[in-house]
Image (spheres, helix red, strand yellow):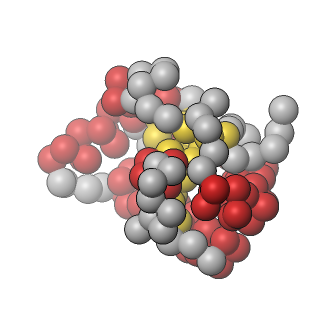
């Protein structure tokens, strides 16, 4: 668990309500990552909220994980990337409304996240309140 900066504590109630809604829909933990966790940055440009879905769940929502990864590097998007982007935009807008913060919400498949963000490689705070 990462130490919680004062500006995160001040917004924690709103962030938790938002995260609990996301957790209820996606069924997986919701994390705050990125520059908002920097205690010397009391006014972050954005608040990075992330969900990591098991690959099978990601594929049910959006489509093939390998295709999603390839489309991200090639820039040649199909409905897989567009569905994913639409869900991220919806989640960001929901966060803007519920938290009055510039939320940047993204969903990653577990196999991708394991490579890009190995366990313990980046600070994060679990936002949802489910045990």
Q: Residue at x 36, y 54 (%)?
A: 81
The image position of residue 100, as x and y in percent, is 62, 77
| Residue in front for this viewpoint, 11 or 26 | 11
Left or right of residue 75: residue 9: right
Left or right of residue 23: residue 113: left
Image quarter of the N terminus: top right
The image position of residue 3, as x and y in percent, is 61, 38
Q: How many marks?
A: 0
Q: Using the rendered image of the protein, determine whether residue 35 is visible from the camera's viewpoint.
A: yes
The image position of residue 4, as x and y in percent, is 63, 45
Q: Residue at x 57, y 72 (%)?
A: 101
| Residue in front for this viewpoint, 97 or 64 | 97
Q: Using the rendered image of the protein, determine whether residue 83 is visible from the camera's viewpoint.
A: no
Residue placed furthest toward the front: 40
Q: Residue at x 19, y 44 (%)?
A: 73
The image position of residue 117, as x and y in percent, is 40, 29
Image quarter of the C terminus: top right
| Residue in front for this viewpoint, 38 or 98 | 38
Q: Is residue 15 above or below residue 122?
A: below
Q: Is residue 51 above or below residue 45?
A: above
């Amino acid at each position: 668990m990462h130490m919680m900066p004062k500006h995160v504590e001040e917004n924690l109630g709103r962030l938790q309500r938002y995260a609990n809604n996301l957790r209820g829909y996606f069924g997986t933990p919701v994390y705050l990552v990125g520059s908002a966790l920097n205690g010397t940055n009391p006014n972050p440009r954005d608040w990075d909220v992330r969900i990591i879905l098991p690959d099978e769940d990601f594929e049910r929502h959006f489509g093939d994980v390998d295709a999603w990864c390839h489309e991200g590097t090639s820039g040649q998007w199909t409905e897989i990337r567009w569905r994913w982007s639409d869900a991220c935009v919806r989640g960001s807008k929901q966060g803007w409304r519920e938290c009055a913060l510039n939320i940047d919400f993204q969903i990653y498949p577990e196999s991708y996240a394991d490579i890009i963000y190995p366990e313990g490689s980046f600070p994060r705070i679990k936002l949802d309140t489910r045990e």
